[in-house]
Image (spheres, grey):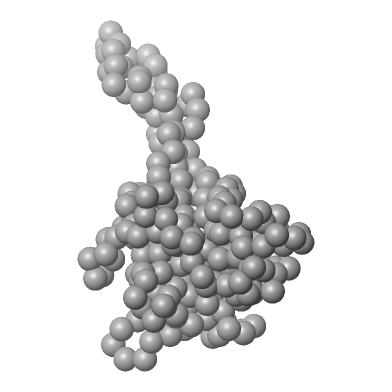
Amino acid sequence: MKTLLPVSLLAFGTLTLAGPLAAAVVFDNTTQANLQSSAFRTGLEYGDEIKLAGSDRFVTEFLVGYFGDFSSGSPTGTLRIYVNDGSDAIPGPQVALRPKTLLWESAPFTLAANNQEIVVNPNITVPDTFTWSIQFQGLGNVVGNGAALSVVNPVTIGGVLSNGAIGSFNDFWIKNGSTEDSWALNTLAGGTVPANFYARVTAVPEPSTVALAGVGLVGLIWAWRRPQSR
């Protein structure tokens, strides 16, 4: 006599095999009420080191906010995601590993004036902590001809950092040269403005995790369907 497969297991199987699992926001710093337009204009690559909440690490959507302060031209921007596996930028007992390994780079996208959002789809697996950056091109990086990442404080969704903060420290990374060691930590307004840039990260479980769950379920169903010995 066959044993009935539990309803909960059947439901899990249906969800696993029928399609992708629901996405989760694992980092969010986009509260409109706290939006500030940063005056930090530069043609150098710069960005934020962030820590994600939850356990989903396959990033399907990445949203970034910026302010375009220009009225002519066709400026562009490029987004990148790095692993922080470089050399230590802080001498002494504290550790701040520089961005090094490039995980992903967007195609250049056209910028627009005023407060804007750009949404990209990296579709990559990231570590719990990583650095994302932007580089603006085709601008003079002065008032009336520049662009800057928007600033929002505080971060609402993110992993807990060593100092108890959520998602992001109050500094940011900027690349002052062409080598990996040219990444340096910087602050906004002498540290009086927390450098938490407008961003939201959406992710799903890693495909390998979902695949393993599916394989295990298929094996269980196969075992259940085998003729039972008397």
Residue closest to the eye, 43 or 212: 43
Residue closest to the eye, 23 or 218: 23
- Label count reads 0
Q: Position of residue 189 (x, y in %)?
A: 41, 77
- Quadrant of the frame with the N terminus: top left
Q: Position of residue 23 (x, y in %)?
A: 44, 38
Specify whether 147 is left or right of 216: right
Specify whether 188 is left or right of 46: left
Q: Residue furthest left?
A: 164
Q: Position of residue 20 (x, y in %)?
A: 49, 32
Question: Which residue appears at 67% of the width and 68% of the height?
Answer: 145
Residue closest to the eye, 176 or 113: 113
Q: Residue furthest bottom?
A: 91
Q: Residue furthest right?
A: 73
Question: Which residue appears at 39% of the width and 74% of the height?
Answer: 171
Q: Is residue 212 visible?
A: no
Q: Position of residue 33 (x, y in %)?
A: 37, 50
Q: Quadrant of residue 50?
A: bottom left
Q: Quadrant of residue 160?
A: bottom left
- Quadrant of the frame with the C terminus: top left
Q: Quadrant of residue 88?
A: bottom left
Q: Residue furthest top?
A: 1
Q: Is residue 147 visible?
A: yes
Question: Which residue appears at 47% of the width and 38% of the height?
Answer: 211
